[in-house]
Amino acid sequence: MTIQEPKQPAAAVLNDIDMKLEVIVIPVSDVDRAKSFYTGLGWRLDADVPGANGFRVVQVTPPGSPCSVIFGSNITTAKPGSAQGLHLIVSDIEAAHAAVAARGAEISSIFHDAGGVFHHQGTDARVPGPHPSRASYGSFASFSDPDGNGWVFQEITSRLPGRIDANGAAFTSSGDLAGALRRAAAAHGEHEKRTGGNHDENWPDWYAQYMVAEQSGAALPT
């Protein structure tokens, strides 16, 4: 009897499989201290589950994030503080900076990179202040937890093409939606100036087009 090897799924089938990053694990040395730090930032406490022989799992979720963070005891061999470059995407870098600072966390000044693209390692090539033109993807601020695990705020307001499904828009929090509405309102004000200052009765349609285009990276209405 001949045993056939199982057929490998076709590439087209693999491309149809959703692979959603929903949990990251960070290494900490003191679970209670880490729990206090992250919940003190306003992150939702999802679980704190003990197990045998000192095993413990704590899960928290940043506001509006589809991805949660897990830390605990006996869940990773990584060295505490070795998780670096964990990015938290925000629509308003100044508001995010103020919110974290108000909760007592030490956070860097807002900065952009000298190269104008992505930030370098550590504090290399940091230029004080947000990106000069406030370009999407270009403004940052960093902070660390008590073990030194490093987090970075990155401001994104308009997505590059292909990052978001062009057929719709999704907002994970009321704050994100409010920010999108404010940007659409400002852009629509400029639109009305260009069209002679007449009030646009179809502004809801214009807003919707602008907000979907901004998320999907499509050409913005003018």
Image (tube, helix red, strand yellow):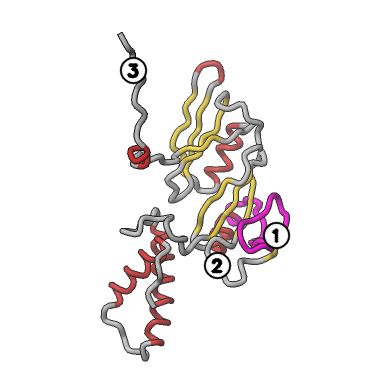
* Residue 128 x, y percent position in the rendering: 69, 65
Pointer 1 local density, CA inside 10 Å: few below 14, some 14–19, many at least 20: some
**Would you say the residues marked 2 and 1 are in contact, meaning their CB atoms lie under 8 Å apart?**
no
The alpha-carbon separation of the residues under discs 1 and 3 comes to: 57 Å
SS for tag 1? strand
Which residue is painted at 55% across and 37% down in the image? Answer: 35
Work out which residue is located at the far left of the displayed protein and give it. Answer: 201
Q: Which residue is mark 3?
A: 4
Tell me, for residue 126, which label it has, or none. Answer: 1
Q: Position of residue 209 (x, y in %)?
A: 33, 69
Question: Is 27 included in the stretch rendered in magenta?
Answer: no
Secondary structure under the numbered disc 3 in the rendered image: loop
Q: Say which mark, if any, is on residue 214.
A: none
- Amino acid type, mark 1: Arg
Which sits earlier in the primary sequence, circle 2 or circle 1? 1
> Please, is residue 143 above or below residue 196 in the view?
above
What is the magenta range? Answer: 101-126
Residue 22, how many percent across, how many down?
A: 44, 40
Most distant residue in the right direction: 124
Label 2: which residue?
135
Mark-to-mark CA distance, 2 and 3: 55 Å
